[in-house]
Image (spheres, rainbow, N blue to C red):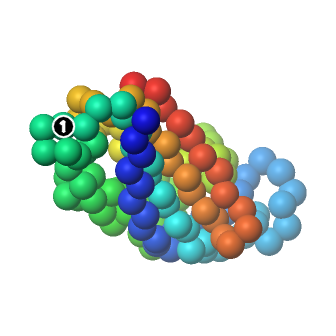
Amino acid sequence: MYTLAVRRDFIARHFLIGGDWGPENLPNSHHYILELQLEGKELDQHGYLVDIVDVEKHLDEIVHYYKENMLNELPEFKGLNPSIEHFSRILATSLNERIKAKNISGLRVVLWENESAWTSFYITR
């Protein structure tokens, strides 16, 4: 099984809802690190799992959309606590819809919220 990973970092803002999480209940920002991992058993005719330029284009578009924004105000977070878990699922789903490579059998987003806390979401294709 081959795995290709690409990382980006960005700052976004949020505040947690539905519980007492101290300072996280107030607007705050995180320096997120987003790692996209793509898996597949077969390489294409050029020896690539996927066109990395295409992957980076989609990743940059996603990062640009969230960069410096308040997650709570975005439609995909309506009715959701903007937790790192929800955020990783939303990112994975969006990237899965954009990346069309046929030989990809799995897509994972690993999202770091700080140097010690991360989550991931995996989609089987």
Q: Position of residue 122 (x, y in %)?
A: 53, 36
Frontmost residue, 99 versus 66? 99
Image height of 7 relative to 81, above or below: below
Identify which residue is drawn at 23% across, 46% down.
48
Image height of 39 relative to 66, above or below: above
Q: Based on the displayed image, in which of its 4 quarters is residue 44 positioned? A: top left
Image height of 96 relative to 71, above or below: above
Identify which residue is drawn at 56% across, 74% down.
31
Identify which residue is drawn at 43% across, 35% down.
1
Task: Mark 1: give few (<14), some (14-19) or many (20+) Cα within 10 Å.
Answer: few
Identify which residue is drawn at 78% across, 47% down.
18
Q: Is residue 65 visible?
A: no
Frontmost residue, 113 versus 69? 113
Q: Position of residue 43 (x, y in %)?
A: 25, 37
Q: Secondary structure at mark 1?
A: loop
Q: Position of residue 99 (x, y in %)?
A: 27, 41
Q: Position of residue 84 (x, y in %)?
A: 64, 53
Left or right: residue 119 versus residue 40 is: right
Q: Based on the displayed image, in which of its 4 quarters is residue 64 positioned? A: bottom left
Frontmost residue, 26 versus 111? 111
Q: Based on the displayed image, in which of its 4 quarters is residue 111 positioned? A: bottom right
Quarter of the image where the C terminus is located: top left
The residue under label 1 is: 44
- Residue type for callout 1: Asp
Image height of 101 relative to 23, above or below: above
